[in-house]
Image (cartoon, rainbow, N blue to C red):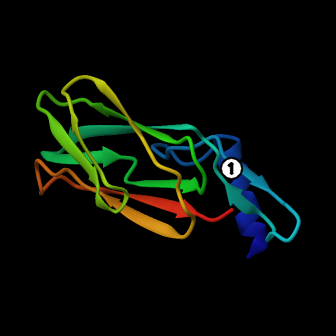
Amino acid sequence: MLRGFVAGSALLGAGLASPGCITADVQYRETRGSRLGEFVDDRKVVEVISTNVGGKNVYIPGTIVLSEGEGRVLSFFNTTDTPHGMTIEGLGIQEILPPGKEHPVALPELEGGNVYPINCHLHPPHRGATLVVLPR
């Protein structure tokens, strides 16, 4: 089982994952008292696309995984020709994403062990995304 995990991690780290897979600049590290292969994602800016695929409005990626901490920004780019909304109720965030523009959204300090739905408050049928915050 661990061998498959290590091989999969190596493929992701080398950018050799399957076509269409979004890879991230993440680290796997061992720290005192941690589990082998602990996931740590210290990115400060995460790019998210709001677009239309097959007649459905979606956020890409659909799942955003970050480690707990502060100083994080979700940078949304709305590729459509209409405004879309973005709300993360659990963090008290609600924004309008202007068409054809990038819109950065600063996140408060994130606490590990939480999962936050991300939705479009202007268009409820818009396929949402999920923000998963892992403890360090």
| Residue at the spot 85% in from the left edge and 71% down from the top edge | 33
In the image, is 69 to the left or to the right of 76? right
| Residue at the spot 11% in from the left edge and 31% down from the top edge | 82
The image shows residue 85, relative to residue 104, as above or below, that is below
Q: Position of residue 40 (x, y in %)?
A: 68, 54
Quadrant in which the C terminus appears: bottom right
Residue named by callout 1:
11
Q: How many marks?
A: 1
At label 1, counting other C-alpha atoms closer than 10 Å, the crowd grade (few under 14, some 14-19, many 20 or more) is: some
Q: Position of residue 100 (x, y in %)?
A: 23, 23
In the image, is 45 to the left or to the right of 83? right
The image shows residue 112, relative to residue 71, as above or below, that is below
- The picture quadrant where one finds residue 92 is bottom left
Question: Residue extending furthest top?
Answer: 100
The image shows residue 61, relative to residue 117, as above or below, that is above
Q: Looking at the image, which is closer to me, 25 or 75?
A: 75
Quadrant in which the N terminus appears: bottom right
| Residue at the spot 78% in from the left edge and 68% down from the top edge | 3
Disc 1 residue type (three-letter): Leu
Question: Residue extending furthest right?
Answer: 32
In the image, is 127 to the left or to the right of 31? left
Mark 1 lies on a secondary structure that is helix
| Residue at the spot 79% in from the left edge and 71% down from the top edge | 35
Q: Position of residue 113 (x, y in %)?
A: 54, 70
